[in-house]
Image: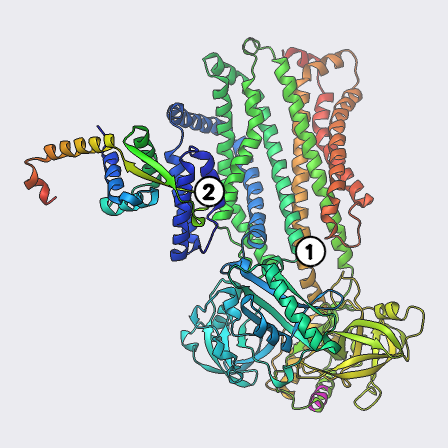
Amino acid sequence: MIGEFELLVLLAVLRTADDAYGSAILAELQSRSGRAVSRGALYVTLDRLETKGLLGSRTAGGTPARGGRPRRYYTVRAPGLKALRESLDALARMREGLELGLKHS
Amino acid sequence: MTNPHPPRLAAWLLERLMPSDAAPAAIGDLGEEYGELSTAAGQTHARLWYWRQAISLAWAYRKPGPRQAGGVTMRQDIRYALRSLARSPGYTVMAIAVLALGIGATSAIFSFVDGVLLKPLPYREPDRIAAVWEQTPDGFRNYVSALNFQDWHDQNRVFENLAAYTNVPATMMAAGEPVEVNASRVSPSYFDVFGVTAALGRTFTPDDGSPDAEGRLVLSHRAWLKYFGGDASVIGRTITFDRRPCTIVGVMAADSPFDRGRTDVWRALTFGPGEQTRDYHWLRVVARLKPGVTLEQAQANMDTIVAAISRDYPDIKKGWGVRVDRLADLTVGDNLRQSLRVLLTAVALLLVLGCANLANLALARGTAREREVVVRAALGASRGRIVRQFLAESVLLSAAGGALGIATGYVMMRGLSALLPPLYLPREAAVAMDGRVVMFCTIVSVATGLLFGIAPAFHASRVDLTGSLRGARGATGDRSRARLRQALVVGQVAIACVLLSGTGLLGRSFLAMQRLEAAHDPERVVTTWLIAPNGRFASPDEARAHYRTLLDRVRAIPGVADGALTTALPLQGWSDAMPFTIAGRPGVNGGTGFKQVSPEYFRTVGLPILRGRGLTDQDRKGTTPVIVINETVRAKYFPDRDPIGERLLIQEIIPGQRALGPPIAWQIVGVVADERATGLTAQSFGGTYAPLEQAPSYGVALVFRTTAGAAAVVPALRAAIKEIDPNQPLGEIRTVGELTADFVAPDRLRTSLLTAFAVIALLLAGVGVYGVISYSVAQRTREMGIRAALGAGRGRLLGQVMGHAGALAMFGIALGLGAALLLGRFLSSLLFGVSPRDATTLAAAGTVLAITAALAAWIPARRAARVDPMTALRTE
């Protein structure tokens, strides 16, 4: 089972698709979720998800603007997709029958 | 990519604090966003953002594991340290005070070093800004002539903008009164070179370069407030400026280089008919390099252009070249740079000295707390734990000292700024207690905490468990601790000795400089500039007549003895630098300072005529042109012959224009003593004086000697000048004494600061000696008692203690003097009239320290001599 923040991060990686590197994921996460996400928390979580095997990454493209340092692009791997699905299903099941009360909150 | 450099320190820290596989991509992300953000929201904002992100990352990646538990013990350490410090308030207060002063002084000086030397120039892409000069045949940078500037401007392929400017005094009508302001005539692209825009209205446009556009003005923020009350509706207003209508088009930003500099008003520069010359050098030139063009490429392109010019005009431009410098390399003068380095070194030494003192105190405390440590160790505290706990105390102290130090430093910085003469710092220098200085301060605080805490902490943790619990002294620990304390004292004495020697040298140099007089009896010689705007005089004859009336009126004022007019005042340089040849000696090509004076000038400033005669009222228009040379010119060009009667060929300086006429054969009639024309200590410069009647000039200064004191004649002077010309603004009225005081103010400030540092250093060294000697006496009470019992006399015991102190002090003094000799070279460029290895000064510094050490040791030594054998033996 993955945590709620991990869930959001995995979704953000999926949403940013081909452009899924640190800054882009952070921007997506902040604008979609509407909460202030600290850069540190995000990067540590990305690392952890990679260690767990849920994310894969490759590095590319050190431009002068980046001081020659590469971007690290993330992709969600099969186990990650599986974990995502399970979490979302669990959420959906938990939510079932509560639509009325939750709609206006 | 507007700013390629995000905060380097932050990136460096991240590289170390983050895992090596995660760091590059994260730092890259930050750098990329930083670039975008600094374009969009400004550099300050972007830097702050960068630091916040870096801290967030560093915090998230802090090592897990034992540190998690460490969080708890850290809190424990701090709580324990607070309790322990609260138990000895005397020590705590003393330590915080020493640290606050030390860190405060260091950060105050650092804020100047940072503002003046370290920060990049506050312009857009400052590395692309260059200064361009003509280069004289003998290789010196020189101002630029108008036609050369035009050619450079039209022909170069390396500069985006090339702008000329010249600083001139001007008169402006503000609220119905004529006021003298500092004006700059600048090419329309001047502000584009620096990449700045107006805060209100606009700066100049290329259109303002057309001849009919001379009348457009840009105000500095300062002048806008002072003369127009900060009224935003001044944009578009027409005012009388230099006796003609001009329109205000813009106001520059507050607290910018264009507010801190000397210029009040910028005026669009176009070249009048009398200014379109190639042999009169009066313009300064700045330029912005095209993107990607290097300084070397610019120099090469300019070399080609200038080579063609000297081919085309061989009679005036043969051998002349061009010099392209990076502006950043020219903004800070050598003297200021060196002064700041010396002050920062001194204050850093003082801080280290303070740390040594605190380390000594902490060591002594460590001894007193041995039992506490032993109990903790016996209860299972590891050595590391004990070290950490002691370090927590010292870092806590230094954090408190640092916080107070920032406040102290801010006050000191403001105080120092107020003491500096106006315009002393380059206009680019933004001295402030900003994030950079606070960051520096924080690092210094933590470093000092570790520096003075580390040795005591390790020593405290090295306890002899069984021995101490039994109550016997842990002899080995004590001995090494004593050695450490003695080494610290030797270091303290050495540092104090270095500071004292350096201060002594600079102090003596300052005193030597103070004895110099820029004019005889300088407090009684009064000066003021009389500004004549363009078009003030219709002809040289009108100026001559005006000057005669003026001098007669001023001399008639009661209390005025001698009075003269001059085109340059003492200490303010020569009004022109002129090449010359000598009639009948074709091989000689000389150069000399040149000023035009009325006959009484020499008497007024007190320059004796050494040979021949001075100038007289008979040297006027129509008679033989005569000139007086100074002793330096005589010694250089007439070493073995009488110069009187020889003729110097110097081109005519045409008044009211920027042009030279044909050479005039000036007959030398006298030799005058060297004037302190360019500075108090500057090497004497060759100079010549022509009569103002024969070589009129439209901008002159009045200088006169009073019998009654300067203040008494000022009202009458104002009235007299107003009566002759109601539109004549009067500049500041200052005595030569005041001019001199301004001139030496930076040296005075530097000397006073160093003296303060040295006195504190002396006190700290004395306290250090006292602490160590009294501690060693206390430790050896028993030994002393036995000796006393065995018949050693008081004198003997006294001598023994004093000998111990003396050995430490001598060792320290020897080290310090050695270091002072090595560091002397570092000071030599700031010294005047004293050698950096001046034996008297060094000996005096050593003696003062020896006396201080002796006084500090005397008190414990007497205590030792009075030891009562019985009490001493009973203590154990």
Residue A20's x, y, as percent?
30, 42
- Quarter of the image for residue A21 reads top left
For the rendered model, the colour scheme is rainbow
The N terminus of chain B sits in image quarter = bottom left
In front of the other: B611 or A84 = A84
Which residue is at 58% across, 45% downward? B105
Q: Secondary structure at mark 1?
A: helix
Residue B270's x, y, as percent?
56, 80
The C terminus of chain B sits in image quarter = top right
- Quarter of the image for residue B803 reads top right
**Numbered mark located on residue B747 in the image:** 1
**Numbered mark located on residue B510 in the image:** none
**Numbered mark located on residue B10 in the image:** 2
Q: Amino acid at mark 1?
A: Asp
**Which residues make up the magenta segment?**
B542-547
> Is B77 rendered above or below residue B654?
above
- The earlier-in-sequence mark between 1 and 2 is 2
In front of the other: B21 or B470 = B21
**Is residue B273 rendered magenta in the image?**
no
Left or right of residue A18, residue A99 in this image: left
Q: Amino acid at mark 2?
A: Ala
- The answer to whether residue B143 is visible is no
Residue B115's x, y, as percent?
55, 53
- The answer to whether residue B23 is visible is yes
Give the spatial CA distance, label 1 vs label 2.
Answer: 37 Å
Left or right of residue B551, residue A96 in this image: left
Left or right of residue B94, residue B845 in this image: right
